[in-house]
Image: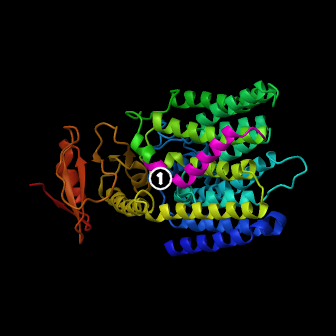
Amino acid sequence: MVYAVVGGWLALAALVVAAWRRMGRDRRWRGGVLLLVLGFSLLHQLLFATATEDAYVSFRYAQNLADGNGPVFNIGDRSETYANFLWLVVIALPRGAFGAEVPPAAVAVSCAAALGCVLAAYFLANRIAALGLPEGAEPRRAIGIAAALLTAGANGLAVYGLSGTEQPMFALLVLCAAYALVAGRPLVAGVLVASAVMTRPEGLALAVVGAVWLVFAAARGRHTWWAPAGFVLGALVFLVPWTAWRVTYYDRFVPDVSQPPGPDWPYLGGFALAHLGFLVPAALVAGLVAARGRAVEARSALWLLLALAVGHTALVVLFEEDPGLSWRLLVPVPPLLAVAAVAGCGVLLPVPRPRAVSRAVPAVTAALTGIAVAVSVFSPEVLARVRAWSTQGAQLAEVGDWLARYLPPGSVVSAGSPGLLASRAGSHVLVVGLDAERSTLAVPGRSGYADRQDCADDLPAWYRVATFRRTGTPFWISVYPRADDASRLVGELDRAPDFRYVSCP
């Protein structure tokens, strides 16, 4: 699959550079190349194609919602340990309406949303580029192809495109809200912002930046004051009833999530290093935006995209903790930077020789996309980590099957990866998070099997460590049965032919 992605990039890059001028004149060429870009995006997603632990948590909530049990992880326990309400509703609809299984439906929707991000980048870049043209000038419609290509190369979008998580849909909502703001549709933008907030809490950055941008534009006379008012009303018409329902249903205003110890600067540094192909062009565009005074509306739109990227990143780094793969919470940032960089080329750069400039834009875009693909393949935080999680997920699935089959019915399992274990345990055992007290059994590990026996007894005193070896392999798993029932529980689990109990020395 790596060779297919690299080969697809090479072929597409050559086509975009060679057919650039023709795409600017012929709509059929643009449509055909855009379809090929979408195909490359799908190929990039297939390189990863792994459901994450967060996805399994969402699957559990969505299944209970579709089955009429409400948005709960375990039936009867109203704990709000999710932050993606709208995503739960979306992926529950196929099961509620047609009886479809939640996981494949969620994967299909997340893939469609990732492809939608590529299309949104195309239209948004063309819209901004058109704002910067002199009256009567011919639009540079091929600019959108370059933005779509660079967005298709974004590794975060590719990692989560087939993951079944809400990240692609959230990124799509961010891009669509930005388009609505640029197009002068503040009421629609407000509705999209409300949808983004109900999909991910980072949507608050979109709400604040969008409102400030509209207020500033109204103060400058580019909009009436009805624009920010309509934006706020469009958002509140959905956010107010949703918040009231949450407070009523879960009896709390803020979700029950842990707070990070402080800003994670190494996390930001790793993201910046892996996305230099997006950051450097966007920084150059920011410099040009600050230095040049023409095309006021286009410059304002570019500032909006850059402010959205900075605001989103600041919110994640300062107030959230991201244990996910490949900078999960920053998935919308590279597409925003891609659109800003490419649209900035269409708006701000002087064009003394159209032929030379038209070749430079696609050539640079193709090269930057190649850098993004190289990061996907060679960065230890991207493909290698996704494949490691895929292996760990398969191991945790085996553990879930083992516990579901051999633990006494009604047992409570406290797990470090509750989503994946619960997906295999079904209703036979009750799976909860690690913060649960006095569970029947605790499985704190999040990374599958270990390479050696681990007898560390780090859990509270009411647990005892028990180590099992996976039969026929060098792998081990440590579980922690309740101390007052440890002998019986270990005996039940030791009946499994695939796991053999080995006492600690």
Q: Is residue 103 left or right of residue 402?
A: right
Q: Is residue 232 magenta?
A: no
Residue lying farthest to the left in this orientation? 505
- The percent position of residue 318, horizontal first and vertical second, equals 46, 34
Quick one: label 1, few (<14), some, or many (20+) residues within 10 Å? many
Residue at mark 1: 56
Q: Which quarter of the figure has residue 256?
A: top left
Q: Is residue 156 above or below residue 309?
A: below
Q: Give the magenta part as a residue range.
A: 270-294
Q: Is residue 219 left or right of residue 313?
A: right
Q: Secondary structure at mark 1?
A: helix
- The percent position of residue 243, horizontal first and vertical second, equals 60, 29
Q: Residue at x 61, y 27 (%)?
A: 244
Question: Looking at the image, which is closer to me, 177 or 389?
Answer: 177
Helix, strand or loop for the magenta stretch, by majority: helix
- The percent position of residue 106, horizontal first and vertical second, equals 58, 56
Q: Do we see residue 340 in this rendering?
A: yes
